[in-house]
């Protein structure tokens, strides 16, 4: 069992993105099957087109963003739920002056982020 407060979890910068940080809410050492992370992309930042080896299940906490998934463009905002299948190219670009923030749950399996050119 693990209980902690969001504000006490440190954020780390994601070097493949611009203005992107992540908090590991529940890591593989705590949850045997899934990891839960919180991402924040600052206004004016972005996460480039990339793939991951595992699926992503996401819940948008705040802000708005243009999200491209497999060549389809979507605008998402607070309350939206997003599913990104494994190996499907995707990216994020905040819209407006607010950061884009979301929870992302992934299986605890080997994963690699690969930039798509």
Image (spheres, rainbow, N blue to C red):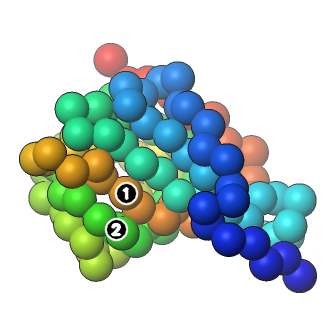
Callout 1–callout 2 Cβ contact below 8 Å = yes
Res. 70 mark: none
Q: Position of residue 58 (x, y in %)?
A: 43, 66
Tally of marks? 2
Q: Position of residue 5 (x, y in %)?
A: 68, 71
- Which residue position is annotated with label 1? 101
- Residue at 69% of width from left, 59% of height from top? 8
Q: Position of residue 26 (x, y in %)?
A: 73, 65
- Residue at 38% of width from left, 31% of height from top? 19
In this view, the residue in front, 1 or 51, is 1
Label 2 crowd (10 A; few <14 / some 14-19 / many >=20): many
Label 1 crowd (10 A; few <14 / some 14-19 / many >=20): many
Where is residue 12, by image quadrant? top right
Quadrant for the N terminus, please: bottom right
- Residue at 48% of width from left, 65% of height from top? 103
In this view, the residue in front, 33 or 96, is 96
- Determine whether the residue tagged by mark 2 lies in a helix, strand or loop: strand
On screen, residue 82 versus residue 98, left or right, reads right
- Which residue position is annotated with label 2? 60
Where is residue 32, by image quadrant? bottom right
In this view, the residue in front, 112 or 39, is 39
Spatial CA distance of label 1 from label 2 is 6 Å
Quadrant for the C terminus, please: top left
Whichever of labels 1 and 2 marks the residue nearer the N terminus, that label is 2
On screen, residue 103 versus residue 24, left or right, reads left
On screen, residue 55 versus residue 109, left or right, reads left
């Amino acid at each position: 069992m693990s209980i902690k407060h969001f504000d006490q979890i440190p954020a780390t910068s994601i070097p493949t993105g611009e203005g992107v940080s992540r908090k590991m809410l529940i890591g593989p050492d705590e949850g045997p099957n899934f990891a839960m992370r919180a991402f924040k992309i600052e206004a004016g930042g972005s996460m480039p087109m990339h793939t991951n080896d595992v699926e992503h299940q996401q819940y948008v906490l705040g802000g708005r963003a243009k999200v491209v998934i497999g060549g389809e463009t979507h605008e998402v905002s607070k309350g939206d739920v997003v599913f990104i299948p494994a190996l499907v190219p995707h990216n994020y670009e905040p819209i407006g002056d607010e950061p884009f923030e979301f929870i992302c749950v992934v299986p605890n399996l080997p994963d690699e982020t690969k930039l798509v050119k």
